[in-house]
Structure formats: C-alpha cells, structure tokens
Amino acid sequence: MSKPSTPNEQIEILFRSIIGPIGATGVAHLMHEPEHIEERVTVLVNTFNEFPDLKEPFRLLVKSLRSQEVEISLEEQIRLYTTKHTRFWLLANMVNKILRTKDLALDYKTGRMPSKPNELLKFAYQAQESLGAEGRYKDIAFACGFLYDFVFHVQRSPLLDLGKNRYDDLIATNFTRSLDQAKKVVLLNKYKSKLSLEKLGPATPFLRNLGQIILTFLNQNSAVEFYKRLEMAKPSEPIRLALEARLFGIHTAMIASYLAEVFPLFENLGEIMSVWGFPFLSFVHGKKDVHDLAGMGLIGVMITEKYKAVDFGLLGKPSLPMPELLHLDFVLTPEAKNDLKI
C-alpha cells in the first residue's frame, strides 16, 4: 500500500477497510456477556437466528465432540459446547464473513476452524482474563481485545493492500503494552474520587495504541521508522500527536475516537479520545467527567512510557510533568506510587 496523499484519503481508507467492516460484522451485541447463563444462551440463539447458515456446521461440530444418538435443540448444543466457546465460535465466523481469510475459514462439513476459536481471537480472551474475567471491566476488556483480533486478521484480508508485509509483532507488542497501561489505569482509578466514567478507563490505552498500528498500515513507507525514533525520543503526548499529524495528516487520538464509535459499549469513549492529550478542552466546556477520564488514562500511559515518580514531585502533582493536566484534581500519593511501582 502506497502512502495516502491526503488526510481525507487516509480517513476514507480507514473507514472502508477497518471501521466500516467492524460494524458490518454485526458483533456489537456479543461484546456484552450477560451474568446469567439463561440470558447468555438466549443471546447466542438469537445470533444463530440472524446467521442461520451457521446452525448446521455448529450442530455437526457439537455432535463430533460428544456423540448423541438423539438430536438435541440448539439451546442444548450451546450448553454442551459452553456459552463461552460458542461465543468465540460465532464471533470468529461472523468476522470471517467480512474478512474471508484462510486463518478463519470454516469447514461447513465439520463445523471446525483452523484453530480453536479462542485462539483465533486470542487478544479478546487475554484481555478479559487479565483484567478480571468476572470483574466490572470484563466487557470493556473483551471488546478492546477483540479490536486487536480484528486488526490482526484484517491485515491478511483483501480489505487492506499490505503486499507481503505483516505486522504480527507490532500488534502483539502494542497489545501487551496496552494491557500493562490498562492495569495501571485501573490502579490509578482507585485513588481518584468522583470518577463517573471510571469503567471506561482501561479502554483508553488500548484505543490509543491501536491507532499507532492503523497508522502504520496506512503509511507503511514511513511509519515504522518514525515510531522507532519516537520510542527513543519519548516526547510528551501533545507533542507526539502533533508530530503524527504533521507527518501523516491524522494522529492516533483521531483514529481512536473513530474506533470508539464502533460499539455501543464504548459510549462516551469517542468524546474522551477526541480530547486525548488535551483533556483541558473538555474541562473548559464543563465536561469534567470526560476531562477526568482522559486525564487519568493519560497518566496511566505516561508512567509506563515516559515519567517516573520523581517527575511528579513530593506533592505528586500530575501537572508538574504534564501541564495539560492542570485542572485534574488528583494527587499521586506515596501509596499510589508504591502501588503502581513507579
């Protein structure tokens, strides 16, 4: 893929090859997992009804795993396979209806795929497990990981013309970094009172770092070397965004705000990511909840990439190293610094 000539061209490719296709999969309702198994089964049955061509291969798959002399209902098939594995199986197949890659190809005669469904969607599985499979962050984590899975597979699809280039290592590295930063955000949020959008906090680094991957897809000739230099220079986030915008015409926060509009589960994240790096823009417009969430997410990212405890001074003021957080009523206490191991 040659470098798009204008920001508008990059945004057009972004929506045509990634944003639009994610929405077209129809997976949004599967990002939330109901607490009770009866509700989970109902959601999965409804999904099969939306994609009836998947019913027969699923029946064959379940039957091959546990031979039954008597045919059982779809609900019983789901319970036998478990709602967890059925969810992954459905997601992988719904994605491949759009991407059509060999990695996700379904054998309609057996119901099997090239690998176990949870291995094909490994980032969703890892994110959910790492941030608490039963905790309040499980849906947000799962959805963020799923976006990484989608991007991992889209590079092998006809939707992107990447030639022979593959970015498996870049995606895996950015996912690991995002997971570490998300955990920092979760810990930070324990020390911030009145944080109304707190549940969305762990998503901010995932979306921010995913933006870098997508910019690399769109600008293969220049992005890899650019991010190598950026890794060494360790600029502040506003400067980083400015450098990206100058070179590429768009920056990671802009892409992140588009990504945040994909799932209803991410409500409010679009606005949060639109002021990423410049949270005071929300504060001056009276949107303190958006400001605070963006600010806390920014601290979580920066303490893994740039700043240490000493940078916040004895009083632990985030605005000391990050003037863009001047309005954030938060103090990085000694206890928090110790908890965060910075």
Image (spheres, helix red, strand yellow):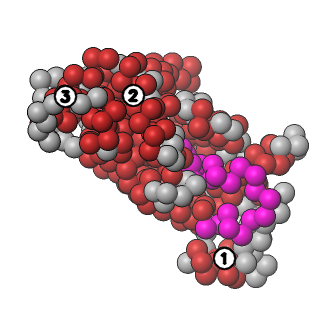
Q: Which mark is residue 268?
A: none
Q: Which residue is mark 3?
A: 71
For marks 3 and 1, the one nearer the N-term is 3
Q: Quadrant of residue 109?
A: top left
Foreground mark, 1 or 2, reads 2
The residue lying at 53 percent from left, 23 percent from top is: 11
- Neighbour class for label 2 at 10 Å: few (<14), some, many (≥20)? some
Q: In the displayed structure, does residue 102 sit left or right of residue 225?
A: left
Q: Are marks 3 and 1 in contact (CB under 8 Å)?
A: no
The picture places residue 185, in percent across and down from the top left corner, at 60, 61
Question: Which residue in the protein does label 1 denote?
Answer: 336
Residue 27 placement (x, y as % from top left): 44, 29
* On screen, residue 322 above or below 219: below
Of the residues shown, which amino acid type is indicated by label 1?
Ala
For mark 3, give the secondary structure.
loop
User: Looking at the picture, does residue 28 appear above or below residue 228?
Assistant: above
The quadrant where residue 102 appears: top left
Eye-nearest disc, 3 or 2: 3
Q: Nearer the viewer, residue 298 or 195?
A: 195
**Which residue occupies 76% across, 52% down?**
196
Amino acid tagged 3: Glu
For mark 2, give the secondary structure: helix
Find disc 2 in the rendering and name its residue.
Answer: 45
Which residue range is magenta in the image? Answer: 187-208
| Residue 198 locus on image (x, y percent) | 68, 54
